[in-house]
Amino acid sequence: MGLIYHISNATDWQQARVDGAYRISTRGRSLEQQGFIHASTAEQVAPVANAVYVGDQGLLVLVIDETRVNPEIVYESVPGWEKPFPHIYGPLNLDAVVKTLPLPKDENGLFTFEVEVEGDTGAG
């Protein structure tokens, strides 16, 4: 199971659960406005959070099983970043989200993110 991650406002995630699908691309932009939903690899979560979500409260990380995502996922290069980012080209089906995790801050006020490895063999 390959996992990707999406930073979400807790309110947006709650609304998606009511609506039946998740349609937020990134902070302040919908899927319809952006054309895709931004996602990240585990290593990209904290740097993205610290670049885009500084000052935000009530954030969580959607842990997404790539094999369960109905729309196409395309890994695309983003200027200024070494590795490509996964982009989800359509509404995210809720059953692809296998769990949600808090997005904590450290003593300096920076977001941190560490993936819990449960039986992960590194194959993906």
Image: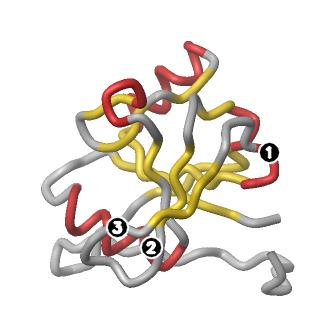
Q: Earlier in the sequence, mark 2 or mark 3?
A: 3
Name the disc covering residue 34, or none. none
The three-letter code of the residue at mark 3 reads: Val
Q: Earlier in the sequence, mark 1 or mark 2?
A: 1
Name the disc covering residue 113, or none. 2
| Residue 57 % position (x, y) | 24, 48
| Residue 72 % position (x, y) | 67, 44
**Comparing labels 3 and 1, the label whose residue is closer to the camera:** 3
Pointer 1: residues within 10 angstroms few (<14), some, or many (20+)? some
Q: Nearer the viewer, residue 66 or 33?
A: 33
The three-letter code of the residue at mark 2 reads: Phe
Residue picked out by circle 1 = 68
> Are dots 1 and 2 in contact, CB under 8 Å?
no
Residue 95's quadrant in the figure?
Answer: top right
User: Is 89 located above or below residue 104 in the figure?
Assistant: above
Name the disc covering residue 78, or none. 3
Q: Nearer the viewer, residue 87 or 101?
A: 87
The three-letter code of the residue at mark 1 reads: Arg
Please tell me whether mark 3 sits on a helix, a strand or a loop. loop
Q: What colouring method underlies this structural image?
A: secondary structure
User: Is 91 located above or below residue 101 in the figure?
Assistant: above
Pointer 3: residues within 10 angstroms few (<14), some, or many (20+)? few
Q: Is residue 33 left or right of residue 67?
A: left
